Amino acid sequence: MPDPNRYSTLAVDPTRRFDYWRDVVCQHCLKADSQPASPSDFCGTLGVKGIGALELYTLSSPLHHWQRDDRHRRCDPNDDLWLSFSAQGFGRFEQSGRRVSVAAGDVFLYDADQCFRFSLGGTENHLLRIPRRWLAARVPGIEQRTATVLDDRRPGVLPLRSMLAQAAEHATLGDGALSARYAETLLDLLVLSLEWQDLTVTHGELDLYGRAMRYIREHLADPELSLERIAQVHHVSTRTVTRAFARHQKTPVAAIWQERLDSSRRALEAGQVKSISQAALEHGFSDFSHYSHAFRKAYGMAPCSLLKRP
């Protein structure tokens, strides 16, 4: 007998195969627009399996493209989180300004409650549907973890991948209690890997903040000093720099501004400059009037009141 939880385009007229594929995936997963990468005959299979309160979908297909936007969210409200494991797949994913190239072995999260673009192809692409409440209570800010590949050097990732592959391979996971335990173990491994990765990121961002502040203090006179320059020098994205400063309730631009003002004030108080223009230029301010206004606003006095007279 045919498996009622397995769908294939092979039994469909070639001219309707992709339409059938799109309808089946949208019915079981999410509403979204989809287009094939190639107009040639499309051949795809979809397996559907329950694991406790979770659902596992296994897709094998040529490369094709999905896009979920606000229109789909309105007609198909859904706040589930999805864990993607491409055993032998490939593609590209984009959500909330974050992008990831998908290669065989990659594991990452995405959010049904946010718009996304997903190009996907290859065999054994496993998608695990997770109710948001299962993760939101254990991982604060889970919506910020989308489109980021889990580092397989961190605890939890390798056994998580193995268990997803085994779940897709076996026809059944046993009785309801065993299946529920399997689902709980999957989520425990996912939470462990997210917490460990977040700890590593936190330490890295703390270190980046210290290095960035040293760079700012050493380059106050550089008129090109900016968020973009800091990111370029430290070989990270501007988003990473901004996040590192946010942990200290600061922005990079505000930090640069404050360091320049503080340093110019110390120079004035120590008699290291002979004029307001020198104090401004040597600390990265090219507009003297703007500098005086900012100085007065920050310290309640004009910079000229600190200028040492000969």
Image: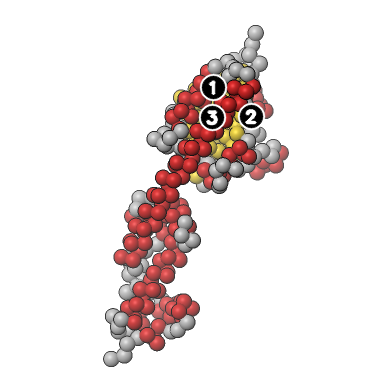
Tell me the quarter of the image containing the N terminus. top right
**Residue 14, image x, y percentages:** 60, 17
Between 257 and 164, the one nearer to me in the picture? 164
**Residue 258, image x, y percentages:** 42, 70
Is residue 140 shown left or right of residue 2?
left
Q: Amino acid at mark 1?
A: Ala
* Residue placed under numbered mark 1 in the picture: 167
How would you rate the neighbour count of disc 3 (Cα within 10 Å): few for under 14, some for 14-19, many for 20 or more? some
Is tag 2's residue or tag 3's residue first in the polypeptide sequence?
A: 2
* Residue placed under numbered mark 3 in the picture: 185
How would you rate the neighbour count of disc 2 (Cα within 10 Å): few for under 14, some for 14-19, many for 20 or more? some
Residue at the top extreme of this rendering: 1
Between 50 and 71, the one nearer to me in the picture? 50
**Residue 105, image x, y percentages:** 44, 29
Q: Amino acid at mark 2?
A: Ala
Q: Amino acid at mark 3?
A: Thr
The answer to whether residue 248 is seen in the rendering is yes
Looking at the image, is 140 positioned above or below residue 123?
Answer: below
* Residue placed under numbered mark 2 in the picture: 53
